[in-house]
Image (cartoon, helix red, strand yellow):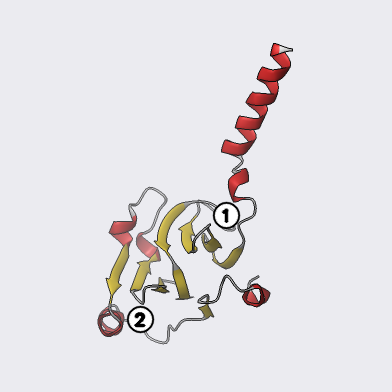
Amino acid sequence: MTKIFVFILTLYLTLTSCVGWGDMGARTCWRDGKYNVYETDRAMALLMGDKEGDSGGAYRVDSVAQIGSNDKFIIIQSEANKYWIVDKSKDTLRTNSKEIVLGPYTFDDFKKVKVKLGITGLEFSLDLTHWRDKWSWERCR
């Protein structure tokens, strides 16, 4: 009886911690290569995985409200109306987000930094401000 209990407990702990059953209900709403935005218990978060389509990874920006990307950059507006820029060319899983995530900026400063970095034609392509509403998930693929 003890061996069965230990086996079941070990199996349970292995599956819930390693597989991440706590995140199995999380929905991915946006992807760009190794990057994805997925639902956490309180907000949408941008993560970078170690391969394309990876659903886990290193946090980059929390509380994503709007997002857009091109080959070099990801631009983000957070729920607190702060603006961020992720330099994809410098990003690795081992890189601290403070080293590659620029911001937070006010909107005016964000526009200036975009010009300084030569980011033209990149606008927000997905609005997640109503991500808690059921209808907003119809646009998430």
Q: Secondary structure at mark 1?
A: loop
Q: Is residue 70 visible?
A: no
| Amino acid on which disc 1 is placed | Ser
| Amino acid on which disc 2 is placed | Ile
Compared with residue 117, is residue 20 higher up or lower down, i.e. above or below? Answer: above
Compared with residue 4, is residue 107 higher up or lower down, i.e. above or below? Answer: below
Residue at mark 2 = 119
Circle nearer the N terminus (1, 2): 1
Q: Position of residue 99 (x, y in %)?
A: 28, 58
Residue at mark 1 = 55
What residue is drawn where x is 29% and y is 70%?
104
What residue is drawn where x is 46% and y is 74%?
65
Q: Position of residue 133 (x, y in %)?
A: 61, 74
- Crowding at mark 2 (Cα within 10 Å: few <14, some 14-19, many 20+): some
What residue is drawn where x is 47% and y is 57%?
48
Q: How many marks?
A: 2
Q: Position of residue 17 (x, y in %)?
A: 57, 37
Comparing 140 with 89, the one in front is 140
- Image marks 1 and 2: residues in contact by CB distance under 8 Å: no
Hey, which quadrant is residue 3 in on the image? top right
Mark 1 or 2, closer to the camera: 1
Task: Please state if 94 lies on the left or on the right of 17 as rendered.
Answer: left
Compared with residue 43, is residue 17 higher up or lower down, i.e. above or below? Answer: above
Q: Quadrant of the C terminus?
A: bottom right
